[in-house]
Image (spheres, rainbow, N blue to C red):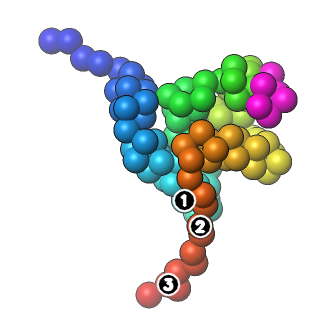
Amino acid sequence: MLTRSYRDTINERALEDNAFATALLDEAISLFLNGESDMARLILRDLVNATVGFEELALAVNKPSKSLHRMLSAKGNPTMDNLTKIFSVLKNRLRVDFEVHTVAHA
């Protein structure tokens, strides 16, 4: 039985379906804001791979691609400035804007 890598599946789907890529970005942002940064970085890494690519991202944010790979690893520790730049590049690539809402606890 042949199986595909989940990353291959994510890459292909994100390339073909902008709504899916946008949902990944939304999920990554939600995870960051809710304190689940490890998972958020991994989703961002997959999204970068599927859309802009690390080499192009490196040029856009003026950082080495290896540094970006480390930042977006499970144990990475990107600064707020670097995250802002990464989000900006992805936002522009996906042609979306951000809108954040707070919700009261029930």
Mark found first going from the N terminus, 3 or 2 = 2
- Crowding around mark 3 (Cα neighbors within 10 Å: few <14, some 14 to 19, many 20+) is few
Image point (40%, 47%), residue name = 19
Q: Which residues are magenta?
A: 59-64
Question: Residue type at mark 1?
Answer: Ser
Decide which of tag 2 and tag 1 comes sooner along the chain.
1
Q: Position of residue 45 (x, y in %)?
A: 58, 33
Question: Which is in the foreground here, disc 3 or disc 2?
Answer: 2
- The verdict on residue 60 being magenta is yes
Mark 3 and mark 2 residues within 8 Å of each other at the beta carbon:
no
Q: Earlier in the sequence, mark 1 or mark 3?
A: 1
Name the kind of residue labelled 3 in the image.
Answer: His
Q: Is residue 50 left or right of residue 67?
A: left
Quarter in which the N terminus is drawn: top left
Which numbered disc covers residue 105?
3
Quarter holding residue 8:
top left
What residue lies at 76% left-to-right and 44% top-to-bottom?
A: 85
In this picture, residue 103 sits left or right of residue 33: left
Image location (x, y in percent) of residue 38? 59, 44
**Residue underneath mark 1:** 30
How far apart are labels 1 and 3 at the CA level?
16 Å
Vertical side of 106 occupied by 57: above or below: above
Q: Position of residue 87 (x, y in %)?
A: 67, 47
Residue 3 image label: none
